[in-house]
């Protein structure tokens, strides 16, 4: 997973050094390759922002450091004061960590190595700008696929969700809390994958903007991005469903077997969604097929499943309905359309159900 980002950093470092030495003519532009590597990093998200923060931080640090050191000189307390002022200025201007860190580093360099009032500080700013621009150019010319990683993470999350729902169904059928406890542990561990998915989506959008090779992926990225929030909501609803199912089993509450069937059907529907996330354009299952499978689940979520049921069964029923709405949105439906697929539970529902 890190092979291409490492290659990008290596090429960017060498290219930045070449540009700074051969094209610009700086004898030892050590900060150009450093800036290239820092601006790229191994994380694929927010690389443009990192480049801007890095160059701006260097500029602020050198500017503040040069101004202060030329007046008060260098020394222990002067370094302390310069770093405080440079990083404070960076924080006031922007809360980005790279911005403030580079401001502090550059201020230290001015206070210890670079002569105040000389051109060394300006040269370092040029080197930082060179490294940042070269890093962006490398991303544009040697890009990672903007959709590939995001859809793999989405598929992993959906696969885990399917496993969780199947474990919950197994526990409800056997009236055994152990499978549900395992399901709950799996569900609680999914948030990191959701956060990583969002990072890859941000990186993918960035690549699709700056790399002509992948301008045609913007539509797919928009669809994946639109699915991120409903997918996050779905995982949260699954956690609540698993917790309440655990309570239901521990309390030995009576449960309509048809409600358990709906849990199992959702597990199969989640597997269809996982396959949809991995499918290339034109392949099956697509969003329409995934939505068809989920509509068949939604049509069976009728209030009669929890007639004379206890509190936990009613909560499980409500969570299944909410989860189905979330998953239909992952399959491309608007929220109102997703809600309309559910059988009504009141005489006058807010959204007219589909006939």
Image: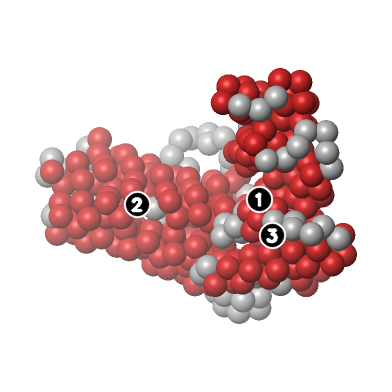
Between 15 and 221, the one nearer to me in the picture? 15
Q: Position of residue 230 (x, y in %)?
A: 53, 49
**Residue 196, percent from left and from top:** 50, 54
Q: Is residue 133 visible?
A: no
Residue reaching furthest to the bottom = 283
Q: Earlier in the sequence, mark 1 or mark 2?
A: 1
User: Mark 3 or 1, which is nearer the eye?
Assistant: 3
Q: Is residue 283 above or below residue 335?
A: below
At label 3, counting other C-alpha atoms closer than 10 Å, the crowd grade (few under 14, some 14-19, many 20 or more) is many
Look at 56% across and 26% down and name the residue there: 76
The residue that disc 3 covers is: 33
Q: CA distance from mark 3 to mark 1?
A: 19 Å
Number of the label disc, if any, that sits on residue 189:
2
Residue 233, above or below 103? below
Which label sits in the foreground, 1 or 2?
1
Which residue is under mark 1? 46
Q: Are marks 3 and 2 in contact (CB under 8 Å)?
A: no
Question: How many other residues sit within 10 Å of disc 2, few (<14), some (14-19) or many (≥20)?
Answer: few
Number of marks: 3
Compute the Cα span from label 3 to label 2: 38 Å
């Amino acid at each position: 997973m890190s092979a291409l980002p490492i290659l990008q950093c290596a090429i960017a470092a060498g290219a930045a050094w070449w540009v700074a030495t051969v094209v610009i003519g700086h004898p030892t532009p050590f900060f150009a390759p450093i800036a290239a590597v820092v601006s790229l990093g191994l994380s694929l998200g927010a690389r443009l922002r990192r480049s801007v923060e890095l160059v701006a931080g260097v500029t602020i640090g050198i500017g503040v450091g040069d101004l202060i050191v030329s007046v008060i000189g260098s020394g222990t307390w002067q370094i302390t004061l310069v770093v405080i002022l440079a990083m404070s200025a960076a924080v006031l201007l922007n809360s980005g960590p790279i911005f403030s860190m580079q401001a502090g580093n550059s201020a230290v360099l001015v206070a210890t190595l670079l002569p105040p009032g000389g051109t060394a500080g300006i040269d370092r700013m040029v080197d930082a700008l060179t490294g940042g621009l070269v890093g962006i150019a490398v991303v544009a010319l040697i890009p990672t696929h903007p959709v590939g990683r995001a859809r793999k993470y989405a598929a992993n999350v959906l696969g885990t969700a399917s496993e969780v729902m199947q474990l919950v169904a197994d526990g409800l059928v056997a009236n055994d809390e152990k499978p549900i406890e395992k399901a709950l542990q799996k569900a609680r561990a999914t948030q990191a994958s959701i956060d990583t998915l969002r990072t890859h989506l941000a990186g993918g959008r960035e690549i699709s903007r700056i790399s002509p090779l992948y301008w045609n992926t913007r539509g797919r990225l928009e669809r994946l991005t639109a699915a991120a929030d409903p997918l996050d909501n779905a995982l949260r609803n699954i956690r609540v469903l698993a917790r309440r199912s655990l309570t239901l089993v521990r309390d030995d509450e009576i449960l309509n077997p048809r409600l358990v069937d709906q849990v199992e059907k959702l597990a199969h529907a989640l597997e269809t969604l996982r396959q949809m996330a991995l499918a290339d354009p034109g392949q099956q299952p697509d969003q329409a097929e995934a939505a068809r499978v989920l509509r068949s689940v939604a049509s069976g979520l009728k209030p009669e499943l929890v007639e004379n049921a206890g509190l936990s069964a009613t909560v499980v029923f409500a969570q299944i309905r909410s989860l189905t709405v979330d998953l239909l949105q992952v399959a491309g439906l608007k929220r109102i359309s997703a809600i309309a697929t559910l059988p009504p539970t009141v005489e006058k529902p807010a959204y007219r159900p589909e006939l």
